[in-house]
Image (cartoon, grey):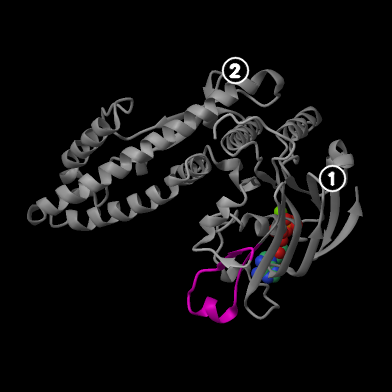
Amino acid sequence: MNNVEKTASSYVDISKLNLTDFRNHSFTKIETDKKFIALVGRNGSGKTNVIEAVSMFSSGKGLRGAQLSEQSNINGNGGWSIFMEVKTAKGITKLGTGIGNSQMMEGKARQCRADGKFLKSSREFNDYIGIIWLTPQMDRLFIGQRTERRKFFDKLVCLIEPSHEQNIKDYDRLIMQRNKVLVDLDNKKSWLDKIEKQISKIAANILISRQIATNRLNKIMDAEVKNNLFPSAKIVMREELGDINTRSSMIEIEAQLQELFFQSRIRDRDTFRTNVGPHRTDFTLYYNKNDMYAENCSTGEQKNLLVSVILAEARVYQEINNGISPILLLDEITAHMDNERVSNLFEQIGEIGSQTWLTGTSEPLFDFISDKADIFNINNGKLSYKGV
Ligand SMILES: Nc1ncnc2c1ncn2[C@@H]1O[C@H](COP(=O)(O)OP(=O)(O)O)[C@@H](O)[C@H]1O
Ligand SMILES: [Mg+2]
């Protein structure tokens, strides 16, 4: 699948989107055949809610990480649903997701469907559509909590190495089990041997997937820098893995990890947590030009660094998906960006070919793309078409 030449016939674009009782949208319907969809309106009008709805067609909880019940329109009957039509070279795919009031009360998961068929989970949407987002909340990513950074980074990895998602889930579950068993360390040695062996196997896979994704992203960021106003950066992982050599073979990494967990038992028991392993990894970006790590760069620079990563992710996605570009959701992206960069950003997105959903508080922000965009005004959860 790698390096398949992009053809005009490789695309996945949203052509219809219906929200029913989702957040402040009691019923909103959007139709488009454009590459850019701009949502314009005052603060609190419901712009981010629309792109949050789009983000529900990926695994997990969407771009706000919200609970299902928070997403139901407070004036509705308790449930919500989102439907979309996706245009591809092979025809139209219909995707739907949502939850009814009674299912929500019973604590059930939201339902996901593709062309009328039920999917096992939202993760299966990834087989139909790739979605990448950037929101203002992520502005603090490099100075905020390590967990948030790792989650963001692992999400990038998942789109490149799909097995990563299940590995992370299984790994986290096993680490929790290990922490419980450690309390009774002296009586549970053979049990710990067994679980640490399992953990090490998954951990090795996690490390390798992260490495593969990092190498691909770094290669793209390096190559694209010449025609790009966004900074050239390098993903750097900060591991808590002792002296493990992550460049050795899978079998050797596994063995080293197992030894690492073994050696860490007493400390882990005394601190009630597992202190080593890929769940402790932090990541950052190294900004080549400033010779500096992202957390020390200015707020604007940090944002631009994130844009670099997102664009690289879109390009890598395309490389491994037969030239199909992911959908980009960019919330308030132009808010603090100079005009030159805004224009360069849209140029690059045009090159990648991603259908892109943008929000902003005023229309002039989208002057650069007005000939390629559908612009909608939103007021109080109601949409009106503004034209192109
Ligand atoms: N479950 C809900 N039901 C109704 N309104 C909601 C719900 N959740 C959020 N809202 C409202 O949606 C509005 C925020 O929408 P949002 O899309 O974030 O605005 P913006 O246009 O600034 O991006 C707020 O007024 C908020 O009160
Ligand atoms: Mg918003």
Classify the position of the N terminus by image quarter: top right
Q: Position of residue 172 (x, y in %)?
A: 34, 52
- Is tag 1's residue or tag 2's residue first in the polypeptide sequence? 2
Task: In this rendered view, identify the residue nearer to me: 158 or 335.
Answer: 158
Residue at image mark 1: 373
Would residue 259 be found to the left or right of residue 345 on screen? left
- Give the crowd class for mark 1: few <14, some 14-19, many >=20 residues within 10 Å: many
In percent of the image, x 84 and y 45: which residue is there?
A: 373
Q: Is residue 35 magenta?
A: no
Q: Is residue 101 magenta?
A: yes
Instruction: Establish if 271 lies above or below 68.
Output: above
Would residue 99 be found to the left or right of residue 366 on screen? left
In magenta, the rendered stretch is: 95-115
Dot 1 and dot 2 residues touching (CB under 8 Å): no
At label 1, the amino acid type is Ala
Q: Position of residue 364 (x, y in %)?
A: 88, 42
Q: Residue furthest right?
A: 387
- Give the crowd class for mark 2: few <14, some 14-19, many >=20 residues within 10 Å: few
Instruction: Establish if 279 lies above or below 290.
Output: below
Task: In this rendered view, identify the residue nearer to me: 63 or 29.
Answer: 29
Residue at image mark 2: 289
Q: Position of residue 94 (x, y in %)?
A: 68, 61
At label 2, the amino acid type is Lys
Instruction: Establish if 321 lies above or below 236.
Output: below
**Residue 60 visible somewhere in the drawing:** no
Q: Which quadrant of the picture is home to ligand 1?
A: bottom right
Describe the element under mark 1 as helix, strand or loop: strand
Q: Position of residue 171 (x, y in %)?
A: 33, 49
Task: In this rendered view, identify the residue nearer to me: 86 or 342.
Answer: 86
Describe the element under mark 2 as helix, strand or loop: loop
In percent of the image, x 67 and y 56: which residue is there?
A: 54
